[in-house]
Amino acid sequence: MDIKPIIVQKYLESLKEDKELDAIFPMLLQSMGFEVLSTPKEYKGFSQYGKDLVAVKDDDDGTKKRFYFELKAGNIDGRNWNNGPNGVRETLTMTIDHDFETTYPKFKDLPIKVVLVFNGMVSGKTREQLNGFVKKEFHDKGTEFVEWNIYKLTELFADKLFGEYLLTDIKTTKLFNRILVNLNTSDGVSDDFVELIDVILTRKTFKGSKKKLPRKWILLFESLRLISLIIYTESKEYNNLDIAKRYLTHLLLRFWYWILKNKLESNQVVMGYFQQILIFYYTLLCEYLKRTMPFARLKDGLASNESGRYEEIGYTYRTIQYLQTLCFTLNFERTFNPKFDFKNANKALVEVINQNSVSARVLLDIDSIVILDIINLLLNLGDVQSAKNYLKQVLGYIRHAKSTYGRLPDANNNIRSVIELTIKGEKPIYYIDSTSPLIATLLEYLALFDMEDEFYLLKEFVKEHDIDLGIFVPHHSLNSSSKELIEDTENDLEEQLFSKSVRDGYQAEISFRKENTLEATITFEEFQELLFKRKDEFTYEYRTDKAGYPFLRDLAHHYFHTPYFPDTWRNISLNSKIST
């Protein structure tokens, strides 16, 4: 049994709002070879146009025609047939009454074909009204009119769009069906989704030009957009945009990895399709934050009353994840919006931090990623004092947790171990806190910020508890002397970063001992000098940055749990000390 039409029809029927159908329909027309001249996004709501979408194509009879598409979600019945300016009858009338202005050659000489598109059926009583209206207003005046109802749309989407790349065989069809069925059953990204994206991107070897892409590659990229829309739509059905956020993060990163792997970051045609995915991802995050920010800015607004005994962990974990999303979104806007409001952005970030009491609480060592996101963003927003204050709060939490509960953040980065420790009061065998890359990193921030008193407090804390300090340094530095130790020679550093957790590197020890001595310890000034000397220990030229998307690296570090590389913070100038 071919389940593809069933899956497609079920999805199309789930599009309950006009804007949801508006978003996906242009992709179908592009896959069918239409030249799309306008989309619903451009003209929706402007009564003088009366056309949701305008396109040109050679019809089945071989004649080139101008197609006027009118889109409606759901059934056509008494509720929407004749209910004022937005009714089906009125909008169809305007389709003919108002000209569409375009520079397309000889557009007005082309015969007109009106298409009513709706993902439902026409009710019995309304059918008589529609037929009479169409005969009088279209057929009798020599204008073609056709309907594309749910069954026609299912046929077209299944054959022309879903069937080209997404549901091409039994394997991908079953994968996609399982993804939709299990979309709300876990907090992660399903293995089926990971496999489906890889199957789509690796099915063929890329061959194209910088000016024009073969149709098969256009359809591939449109399939990625289609998947994004479907995941987003299904997530809204569950009233849980966090699902879409997780799944589309993976899709975006995997797409960028594919671009890097194929050396296409300078191909403007390919990059145009990537930007569509990226912008859609950004709009998703904006919608997510718009829904949640009013609560996040309340006192302990990210806490939940329904998590029971696990809320001590859940509140902290949820807050750290939320701050990561907020930082990424603000960095995106800071990069692309010339009118970015630094003051309001800073106010929002500081308010969320201050209102949620666990914002500086660290459970896992890898939480250093979000800690650094916050500190660096505050610096970029010009709020040095808030960056220093937040750094002090984080260090205070670390010292408090050690003195009160006998633990440091888990360097093994296993949240289950943290939960077990919280419940049983004993560290699981796999809980590791004798070493801390996080503390090593924060120690260097103290030196960069010229926070001498905090430096000595942390120094004594480390010595008292005999904590090993080290910072992860990839072998790939431009001046590296250890490149021969790289194990994954198939991927450069960035390709590793966007596909997995980076392991090709070493732990650079951070010590308080003076060089060539076992006893004497260095002063604060001497530590600053050593840090300045280590500034070029890791340097790298990122293709992602050159392409204009430095914030994507932050997302990859977070998603694949790769600690930030030293160039994330060591480029802060030591010569111009930051004043209090």
Image: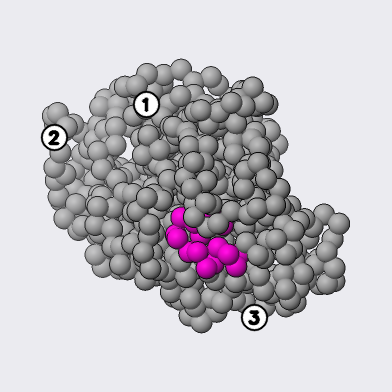
Location of mark 2 (residue)? 103
In front: label 2 or label 1 = 1
Position of 86 relative to 534 (above/below):
below
Q: Residue at x 55, y 57 (%)?
A: 523
The image's mark for residue 267 is 1
Residue 199 x/y as whole percent: 61, 31
Q: Is tag 3's residue or tag 1's residue first in the polypeptide sequence?
A: 1
Which stretch appears magenta?
443-458
Q: Position of residue 454 (x, y in %)?
A: 54, 67
Q: Residue at x 46, y 55 (%)?
A: 448
Q: What secondary structure is found at the residue carrying circle 1?
A: loop
Question: Which of the numbered marks, if any, corresponds to residue 205?
Answer: none
Label 2 or label 1, whichever comes before in sequence order: 2
Q: Assess whether residue 353 is covered by the magenta stretch.
A: no
Q: Residue under circle 3?
A: 305
Task: Mark 2 vs mark 3: give the one in front.
Answer: 3
As shown in the figure, which amino acid type bears the numbered disc 2? Thr
Circles 2 and 1 in contact, beta carbons < 8 Å: no
Q: Depth check: 500 or 529 in front?
A: 529
Residue depicted at x 47% and y 70%: 389
What residue is drawn where x is 62% and y is 43%? 515
Quarter of the rendering containing residue 397: bottom right
Pointer 1 local density, CA inside 10 Å: few below 14, some 14–19, many at least 20: some
The amino acid at mark 1 is Asn
Q: Give the amino acid type for the residue marked by disc 3 in the picture.
A: Asn
Q: Alpha carbon of mark 2 to alpha carbon of mark 3: how far?
A: 59 Å
Q: Is residue 65 above or below residue 133?
A: above
